Image: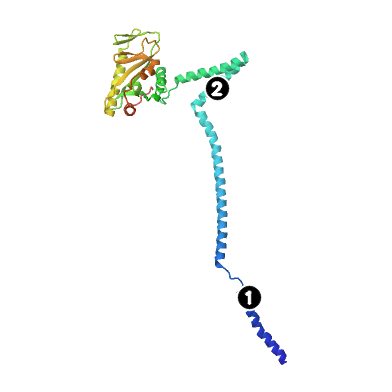
Amino acid sequence: MAITERGKGQGARGQPGEETERSREDQHEAPVNPLRESAEEAAQSTAQTTAQVTAEDAAAEDAAAEAAAQAAAEEEPRGAAALLGDPQIRQWAWRVGIAVVVGAVLSVALGVRLGIAAAVLVVVVDSVRASRKDSSVAAWKKSSAAERRTEKQLKSLQRNGYRVLHARAVPRDDEGVSDGRIDHLVIGPSGVYAIDSEKWDKRLPVRTQSHLKLFHGPFNKKDRLDEARWEAEQASRIIAGRVGFEVPVQPSVAIYGPSIPWKVMRVRDVDVYAGNRARAYLRRRPKILTDTDVQRIFTAAEEALPPKYPD
């Protein structure tokens, strides 16, 4: 009995020893590193955030693509409407349509070659007709044929340093009312010119008498010359008041229709010449103004002489 109890006592004393060994083993295990746990948590959080941002970006791109597709779908009919609203597009569509009809009819009646030639001729003739009615001045759509012809000649002088103002009213009184109009006010290296374009009956001859009188058939054009000279004088006075120095303005009349038996004739201080010589009339003159002078005079004239377009 004593031995048995002693054994039990030793066994009882051995239990704490086992617990002590387990505690030592637990202590020998690798300790937990708090920095690693923080890094792992941060990496996991970053991955989740990146995935969320990527998803949001993808959704935004999809929404933008859908909006762009919708805008393009809406823009197509608008673009077509804009093209149809362009007067030049409508004019060419009408022109081509007429040419196709004429070409088809004549191809059946006279042959394909003649039909094609007739269609091309229709396009060319209508284009020439329209060009004679067009004006580069947006508001000057009711200008006369003579004014449009002079305008086209003057347009080619822009590369030579000339500036042009069309349909300018002179003078302006305190109420802004004008009594006259210069068809073309030209400012360039050779000076400043007030040109009036006239369409006269080609059946009547044009002649002068001692550089003091101009006749168109039996009609004395004294009043017309005096008016042109007065308009130029008023323009000269008004522009000079703006720029601070004298600005001579030479009046002239470009005549279309009858034959003019001279190149340039000065009658009552007004230069008279055939309308188709307007460009040559300006080019064959010495240079008296610098580019700075031209710009200053042009700016002053543009501000002081308002446009006066036909009603």
Q: Looking at the image, which residue sits at the far bottom?
A: 2
State which tag comes first along the sequence, 1 or 2: 1
Q: Residue at x 56, y 68 (%)?
A: 33
Splitting the image into 4 quarters, where does residue 144 fall?
top left
Can you give x and y, in whole percent of width and height, for residue 67 in the image? 54, 42
Q: Nearer the viewer, residue 48 or 201?
A: 48
Q: Residue furthest front?
A: 286
Tell me whether the residue at label 1 lies in contact with that at label 2, contact meaning CB atoms closer than 8 angstroms: no
| Residue type pointed to by label 1 | Glu
Q: Which mark is residue 56?
A: none
Quadrant for the N terminus, please: bottom right
Quadrant containing the C terminus is top left
44 vs 161, nearest the viewer: 161
- The x and y percentages for residue 58 are 57, 49
Question: What residue is disc 1 on?
Answer: 25
Residue sitting at 56 percent across and 19 percent down? 99
Q: Is residue 238 above or below residue 221?
A: below
| Residue indicated by mark 2 | 96
Q: Position of residue 128 (x, y in %)?
A: 48, 18
Quick check: 172 above or below 15? above
Q: Which of label 1 and label 2 is nearer to you?
A: 1
